[in-house]
Image (spheres, coloured by chain):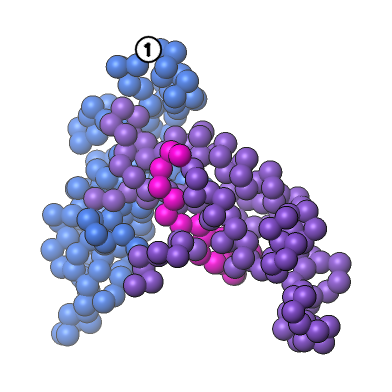
Amino acid sequence: MTLHLTRRYSLSASHRLHSPRLGEEENQRTYGKCNNPYGHGHNYVVEVSVSGPADPATGMVAHLGELDAFVAREVLETFDHKYLNEDVAAFCERVPTTENLCIEIYNRLRAFPGARLERVRLEETSLNSFEYAGESDRRAS
Amino acid sequence: MIYLTRKIEFSAAHLYHNSAFSAEENRRIFGKCNNPHGHGHNYVLEVTVAGAPDPTTGMVLDLKELKEILQREIIDRMDHRFLNYEVPELAGQIPTCENIAATIWKLLEPRITRGRLHRVRLYETPDLFVDCYGDGDAR
């Protein structure tokens, strides 16, 4: 039997989709209104899934307080109420699409010492979501 | 392969306390979940069965049958109960979302005779849930 524990967090941030590798017109065509010059924002929902056996003494896969503190430090403090393009070093070069944000969050959470990180699922809006489970995603094979 | 999911809700009380820990350790590890008289949640349970549709009925399994199994095994056992004291299957365990989901898996797995139990997902709140899979079946 395998247990996955999932916790949902919210963060609000703005971004602008614009690639330095594309010309003005091509950026506009590729990203549409997401290319508007001053950016726009979303209420993102981050779903963090970790796995492992339930500790017999506590009944827990991961201590929720520890997971919350780790996510707050590694993710929420970095991204919440920020302009991703300007305020986050990782997006100085990379386009802050929600795909790239999902991968960035996953990479930041991999070091969680309390359990194995399984997956990050990121909702950009209630209609769009992205999942990343690392390069060795078991589902991809 | 088709994955069929049925959802139910039940409301129950619990508290987290390990008698091997001191009062102070219990408070530090379990926080407000250690409050002595317990507290409760509206649990939402999603049960997913995997299988191929029967050629005659077009069904993986009869939903009525699944509904009855969930009523008998889960609702009748856990709904409006204090999980620590009234559910023998959880006796001696801390009734975390993890342990409740694993217990639900063990109760349901032998009862699902058409298709096979693929996943038990238990929401303690909309922002916290646990998925339980059989060995090698996580995805």
Residue B100 position (above or below residue B66): above
Residue B63 position (above or below residue A43): below
Which residues, given as a range, are shown in magenta? A113-131
Q: Looking at this view, is A57 or A88 the one in front?
A: A88
Q: Colour of chain A?
A: purple
Q: Looking at this view, is A20 or B19 the one in front?
A: A20
Looking at the rendered structure, the number of numbered marks drawn on it comes to 1
Name the amino acid, label 1.
Ser
Quarter location, residue B102: top left
Q: Looking at this view, is A18 or B130 the one in front?
A: A18
Residue A5 position (above or below residue B3): above
Please provide percent x and percent y for residue B99. Answer: 30, 39
Q: Is residue A34 magenta?
A: no
Q: Main secondary structure of the magenta part?
A: strand
Residue drawn at x 29%, y 17% is B20
Q: Is residue B35 visible to us here?
A: no
Residue drawn at x 69%, y 67% is A94
Residue A94 position (above or below residue B31): below
Q: Residues within 10 Å of mark 1 (few under 14, many from 20)?
A: few
Residue drawn at x 86%, y 67% is A38
Residue drawn at x 38%, y 32% is B13
Quarter location, residue B111: bottom left
Quarter location, residue A63: top left
Q: Is residue A121 magenta?
A: yes
Q: Is residue A92 left or right of residue A2?
A: right
Which chain is drawn using blue? B
